[in-house]
Amino acid sequence: MTRRALAPGLVAVILWGLAPVATRAAVGHLSPLPLLTLRMTAATLVLLPWAVPVFRQLRPRAAGRLAAAGLLGLVGYNLPVTAGLRWLPAATAGLLLATEPVWVLVLGRVFLGERGGVRTWLGSAAALAGVAVLAGPGAVTGASGWRALAGTGLVLAGTLAFAAYTIVVRPLSREFGAVPATAASTAVGTLPYLAFAWTLPGAGLAHLGPAVWAELAFLALGSTAAGMLLWNVAVLSGGTARVSLLLYLEPVVSVIGAAAFLGERVGPVTLGGGALILAGVAVAGTGASRTPDPCPAPGPGASTDLPELGKCPHRRRSVRRPCAARAPPRPGARAAAASAVNRRPPRRRRSGPRDARRRSPRHSPRRLPAPAPRPRRARPAP
C-alpha cells in the first residue's frame, strides 16, 4: 500500500473511530434528536453538490430504493446508536459497531441467498460470542447495568440497520457511484430530522460551550463528510481489498480515544469481548468466498464508507471516467465487431435428385450444329 493511499485511509479510519467518542461526549449536553438534526443538516449542505446529479437522473424504481437507504442509514442507524451512547461507554460501542460485517453476511444469506464458507460462519459465531461477553452478566453488574444492556441493544439495532442499508444501497452505488449515492441518501435521510427542527430553540443551544460545538462540527464535517471523501481517495489510490484492511483499526481507535478523551477504564470483560469480535470479523472477512465485483458495493464500517468514487461505464449509463476493472474498447473495435456479426457466409443450395437430373446428359438440352457457310458466287468477268 502506497503512502498516497495509506495517509487518507488512516485519517478516515481515525475520524470514524472517534465518532462514538465525540457522540458520547455530546449527548451529555444535548438530546439525540437536536444533535442529529444539526449534524445531518450540516453534512447534507457539504455533500449536496454530489447529490444533485443523482436527483436529476433518478428513476421511479431507484427513488424508492434511495428513500429506503436514507431511512435505514440516517435514521435506523444513527438514531439508535446516538441514543444508546447515553448509557453505554464509547469503547464498548466502538467494539459493537465492529460487528457490522457479520450482520451484512447474515442479511445477505437470508435475503439474497449469498453463501459463505465455513470460515465465514465460524468467524461470525466468534464475533457474536464477543457480543454476548460484552452484553453478558459482567456488563450489567452495578447500578447502571440495565441501562448499559439497553444501550447495547440500541447499538446492535443500529448495526443491523446499517447492514440493511449496505445491501439496499449497492445497486445505487453501482449505477451512480459511491460518493453520489451516499450523498443522495444522506440528503434524503436528513428530511425526517427537519421535522424536529422545532426542538432546536428549546434545546439550550445558547448555553452550549465551545467544546460541544467542536464535537458537533467534528461529527458533521469530519466523520460524515471528510471521512467519506478521504476514504474514496484512498481506495482509488490503493484498491478496495488492501485499503479495507484498515477498517480493523477502527474499534481500536474507539477504545484508545475513549480512554484518552473520556477517561474510560477498559476492563477485562471489554478486552475479552473486543478480542473475540475482532478475531471473528477478521476470520469472517478472509473466509468470504465471493466473486469480486468490477464495481464494488459499499463496504461495512461505522460510517458510510463506500469504496469507489465515480460511476461504472458498463452499467446503464456511460460516463467520462472509465472503470478501473475494464479497459475502454479500442477505436473502431465496436464497428469491427458489428460488421463481423452482420457478415454472414453465403447460403449453400442443397442438392437433390432434381438437381442430379438437371446435370445428367440425358436431360441436357441438345446443341444444334453450326450452319455451314454459304458459298460465294463468282462474279462474271467484265
Image: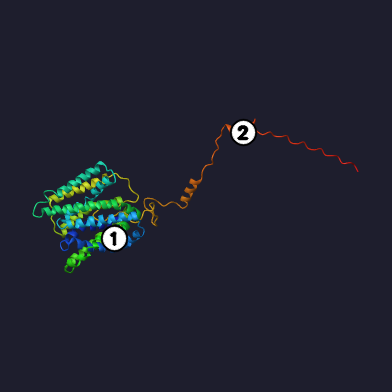
Q: Position of residue 142 (x, y in %)?
A: 8, 53
Residue with the most extreme top position: 362
The answer to whether the residue labelled 1 contacts the one labelled 2, judged by CB atoms less than 8 Å apart, is no
What is the C-alpha distance between the residues marked 1 and 2?
Answer: 81 Å
Q: Nearer the viewer, residue 218 or 271?
A: 218
Q: Position of residue 365 (x, y in %)?
A: 67, 34
Farthest residue, direction bottom: 206
Horizontal side of 249 relative to 345 (left or right) equals left
Locate residue 106, reporting x and y percent: 24, 46
Crowding at dot 1, Cα within 10 Å, few <14 / some 14-19 / many 20+, comes out as many
Based on the displayed image, in which of its 4 quarters is residue 322 positioned?
bottom left
Give the answer, above or below, for where 287 lies relative to 44: above
Q: Is residue 334 left or right of residue 290?
A: right
Quarter of the figure that contains the C terminus: top right
Above or below, 173 against 352 in this view is: below
Callout 2: SS: helix
Coloring scheme of the render?
Answer: rainbow
Q: Identify the residue under disc 2.
A: 358
Figure check: 367 above or below 291: above
Q: Do we see residue 119 in this rendering?
A: yes
List the residue tagged with mark 1. 187
Kind of residue indicated by mark 1: Ala
Callout in the foreground (1, 2): 2
Under circle 1, the secondary element is helix
Residue at the image point whose x is 31% and y is 62% from the top? 48
Query: Where on the picture, by quarter, is residue 353?
Result: top right
The three-letter code of the residue at mark 2 reads Arg
